[in-house]
Amino acid sequence: MQASIEQLSQIIVFAGLEPSDKISLQPHTQVQRYKQGEIILHEGDRLPAKLYAVVSGTIQITKTANTGKETILRMLDTGEIFAAPALLGNGISPATVTAETDCEILTVERDALLNAIGKNPDIALRMLMVLNHRIQQLHETVHGLVSERAVVRLARLILYFAAEYGTESSQKGEILKVKLPYYRIARSIGITYEECVRLVKSLKSVVAYSRGGKMTIVDAKKLESVASGNTEAEIFG
């Protein structure tokens, strides 16, 4: 189905567009619904020349190595764009995109998008800002996998999700609003499930893990210390 004005307004790169410009884009858009766990794009898929964006829900982007090991690259929420190679690269999906929750995906045809950019160059600027931010994140991730201990990567991951999705205060500490089950943590920082369980338990004085991925930051200062590379024994246990 065609995107509504409200749906187009949710997309970050279209923020600030005049209603008339959104109306002009509408005939060149499509919104498709996906159920939780459904594959939206497979790694290696040939992509049509379109802009892809999340209208509602959350998606997960994963990459599979030649060894078969799968790594979570990122999670994206409402308003985010993805699958940049469809517009700017070789037209082949570099990763697998899965619906983390029930979601709606909006696409905009390339020619219509270029026409909109011609009238509103800020769209291109916003796209470049988003892509630049992701390149920086990817650089930090690769650097961390090569040179940082797993516990440091774990601490940084928890702090990232706390900052990105927020927390709720409780008597025990700050509870992350997003769930972080062991398998998701392990696949995000490049370790085994078993090592992930061991690391989280080693930080029991810093973070508390509950069944289902509920994560509570018990001592924010200590967690930040671990994230900065301080892995002294007194922090653990």
Image (cartoon, rainbow, N blue to C red):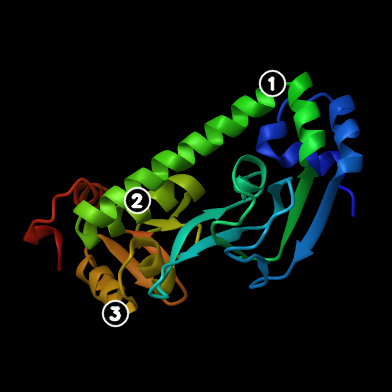
| Mark sitting earlier along the chain (2/1) | 1
Q: Which residue is mark 1?
A: 121
Please state which of the two labelled residues, at mark 3 or mark 1, is closer to the viewer. Answer: 1
Which quadrant, please, contains the C terminus?
bottom left
Disc 3/disc 1 C-alpha distance (Å): 49 Å
Q: Is residue 168 visible?
A: yes
**Cα separation between marks 2 and 1:** 31 Å
Name the residue nearer the viewer: 101 or 221.
101
Q: Eyeballing the image, is 192 above or below 6? A: below
Mark 3 or mark 2: whose residue is earlier in sequence? 2
Residue 51 placed where, x, y %? 71, 44
For the point 20% across and 69% down, which residue is it? 202
**Disc 3 on helix, strand or loop?**
helix
Estimate the spatial distance between the alpha carbons at disc 3 and disc 2, rounded to whole Å.
21 Å
Residue 172 visible (yes or no): no
Q: Which residue is outermost to the bottom?
A: 194
- Residue 62 spot, x, y in % from top left: 50, 63
**In the rendered structure, which amino acid carries the disc numbered 1?**
Pro
Q: Name, please, the residue furthest toward the left.
A: 233
Q: Which residue is mark 3?
A: 194
Residue 211 horizontal side relative to residue 80, left or right: left
The image quarter containing residue 130 is top right
In the image, what residue type sits under mark 2?
Thr
* Residue placed most toward the observer, 217 or 187: 187
The crowding category of the residue bearing disc 1, from other C-alpha atoms within 10 Å (few below 14, some 14 to 19, many at least 20), is few
Q: Which residue is mark 2?
A: 141
Which of the 4 image quarters holds residue 58? bottom right
Three-letter amino acid code at the position of disc 3: Glu
* Residue 52 screen position, x and y as percent: 70, 48
Q: Are marks 2 and 1 in contact (CB under 8 Å)?
A: no
Element under disc 1: loop
